Amino acid sequence: MSSGRITPRMRPAKERICDFEEVSLGYTEEEAVAEASRCLLCGACVKGCPVGIDIPGFIKAIQEKDFKRGYQIIKKNNLLPAICGRVCPQETQCEAMCILGKKGDPINIGALERFLADHYADESIPRINENGHKAAVVGSGPGGLTAAFELRRAGFQVTVYEALHELGGVLKYGIPGFRLPDDVVDREIETLKKMGVEFLTSFLIGKTLTIDELLQKNDAVLIATGAGLPGYLGIPGENGIGVLLANELLTRVNLMKAYDFPRYDTPVISGKKIVVIGGGNVAMDTARVSRRMGADVVICYRREEKDMPARLEERHHAKEEGIDFQVLTNPVEILLNDEGRVRGMVVERMKITGVADDGRSRIASTKETFEMETDLVVEAIGQSPNKIIRENVEKLEFDKKGRIVVDENLKTTKDNVWAAGDIVSGAATVILAMGEAKEAARAIVEKFGG
Amino acid sequence: MRNTIVSKENLSEDVCSFIVEHPEIASHYEPGQFVIVRVHEKGERIPLTIVDADPEKGTIRLVVQGVGLTSKLMNQMKAGDRLIDLLGPLGRPFHFPADAKKGLFVGGGLGIAPLYPKVKHFEGERHVTLGAKDASHLILQKEMKAASFRLTLCTDDGSLGEKGLVTHAMQRLFDSGESFDFCVAIGPLVMMKAVVEANKALGLPTFVSLNPIMVDGTGMCGGCRFEYDGEVKFACVDGPVFDGFKVNFHDLLVRSRQYEKHECRALEHYREKKSKKESL
Ligand SMILES: Cc1cc2nc3c(=O)[nH]c(=O)nc-3n(C[C@H](O)[C@H](O)[C@H](O)COP(=O)(O)OP(=O)(O)OC[C@H]3O[C@@H](n4cnc5c(N)ncnc54)[C@H](O)[C@@H]3O)c2cc1C
Ligand code: FES
């Protein structure tokens, strides 16, 4: 038994910042077995998994080299293991509970999950007994895809409506290919298509069709429209040329392939020195995308690095790629030149004044300001739900933050309408969206029969 | 089938009118709304105003002036071709002020097509003033004539109607003692800005329809944002029609230049590709 945690091989930083190919190469069989063999199979990790995967079960299967069984164990609770293995914040979930982590390094559960999903996925289609009911799913992010799978498996005729021209939600337009390749997501969508799920893209529910119209044609409607509305700082200079909200940069690059302009028609404004504001996954992805577009990149975050909500691995990769973390800095003004282009940013230095209830640092301004040199500023400071459905529906209750109000079964206040994912919980995680979608689907199946 | 071009008409050298099939958009459309279009697999997403809709036939009408790469590509499409993506109807519908009896409609160049549905849907007395650089760019004359109580045309070079800018023509209307309950102005930013400034002095409520650079058109990217009445608005979901007095035109003018260089580059690339193909 080896003692230290085995990290999958990564492409060298110098090489990977020149393209959008995946950074982590994943485990070889030998590495996977060696990492699995460190595990004591105590099962503490399961408590940290939002969908309760039998983690010791699949790790034991890897120890025994019964990989197919391992995959099947994961699949019982998680429809999208190839995706979750790559993007779940394991260090705050399953791996945080690992008892090996108390003294040394926790088991690399995410990498093991990905190993099984990449090599031992079973693409067989479940047998479907039509139940004569129809369901509409709004949104094709991880929540919508999971719900579509569960409902179809139970025999519903399922149609997924997606506003964008591509399927996958944040998995496609947000998370870049070097972290989650498009084909990993497409494989899952293909399976759903084979199962007979119908997908309609460029359908904006609320505008192209309303929720009430969907209800006329369906027994149940499940809303999984995510939290796509970007926040902004509200500081002077924000509308200048060279100030983008992260979603615009990510959409242009990931969805519209602006990195390959002019072979693709969509361009993206570029800079030599880019400042990205924020400390979440969106900020990290934006910074790393910008780096790949050839810029020097600085991340400006108002708390300390340990407070950043971004996955640990991404922070680590960002640093390897030469991204400069300027913590305890808070932007106060974006400076523009005569043409209205960004020429710099004024930031104030923050100081730590204590610890907040959630364990993050409490901060306050030192009143000391300085100027950062930059020609492109990208704001990645949080997302909230889009207003389109809200403005075009009746009897559906929303809370102050624009999230749909649901009961413990994810049922909304409107008859035959359920909701799941970021539209219910605010900007959260892939696995939570999937977990909720599964619950909502279960409730729908319960009501109409499977 | 959805997205199929049912028919096409050339309105001028570089302006085409399309009838496109899309029953859902046709039946949900209200004046003021627009669509996002993509014309090929590697294409960008561009906004186009819905000029008209026929819910019974399940079709919408789009008028496209070939200025950028995508609009030029679209104008090469023919009846029977399919738009690869068509999303809508987007934006908020526009409603005229209550009790308005007499409206002044001002359209310039590219703005004439999106102005048309507003003219058509107003039930009071419609005064229309249109301007373009020359006669060939003054599109939709026939429809506008049929829809308006009084139509004034002007061109920069005097090749049709009065010679001069729409604001001059408007001024003559005001000088002759005409008064209106509101004005709708659609055209290049500088034109809308000039109209708004003139009308502000008169206290004539003025609505403008904005057409900034957009990506998704659903409020997701923030690329279409600008300052309005001291707040940030997203033109795609909060508009596209706004109270002109509250619009910060300076912001919009600056932001409209963001991709100037890229647009030229895209067109160059396209021409190179085309000439390579032709020389093969
Ligand atoms: C850049 C970025 C990086 C992230 N990184 C991670 C990570 O590493 N790990 C992690 O766990 N989470 C991460 N997240 C968060 C995670 O992606 C989300 O929590 C998750 O995608 C939510 O899933 P969802 O299905 O609720 O919504 P989404 O994935 O947002 O999907 C919603 C879909 O609905 C569509 N839609 C919206 N409105 C309508 C409408 N009216 N009609 C039709 N369709 C509509 C949208 O276009 C979209 O495709 C990241 C998010 C971003 C933006
Ligand atoms: S076009 Fe993206 S938010 Fe308006």
Image (spheres, rainbow, N blue to C red):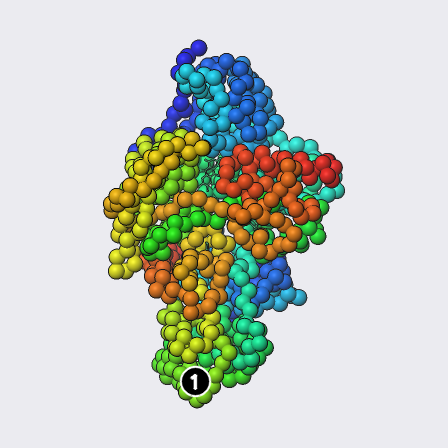
Residue B40 % position (x, y): 48, 54
- Determine whether the residue tagged by mark 1 lies in a helix, strand or loop: helix
Q: Spot the residue most to the bottom.
A: B176
Residue type at tag 1: Phe
A24 and A309: which is toward the camera: A309
| Residue A401 in view of the camera | yes
Residue A280 % position (x, y): 41, 38
| Residue B160 in view of the camera | no
Q: For residue A412, what is the image quadrant?
A: top right
Q: Spot the residue most to the front.
A: A353
Residue B169 % position (x, y): 41, 83
- Residue placed under numbered mark 1 in the picture: B174
- Asked if residue A207 lies left or right of residue A105, the reply is right
A247 and B55: which is toward the camera: A247
The residue at 48%/31% (across/down) is A88
Q: Spot the residue most to the top.
A: A1
**Around disc 1, counting alpha carbons within 10 Å, would you say few (fewer than 14), some (14 to 19), or many (20 or more)?**
few
Residue B237 % position (x, y): 50, 58
The residue at 62%/42% (across/down) is A406
The relative height of residue A356 versus residue A271 in the rendered view (above or below) is above
In the picture, the quarter occupied by the N terminus of chain B is bottom right
A267 and B171: which is toward the camera: B171
The residue at 26%/57% (across/down) is A337
The relative height of residue A210 versus residue A97 in the rendered view (above or below) is below
A362 and B119: which is toward the camera: A362
The residue at 43%/84% (across/down) is B174
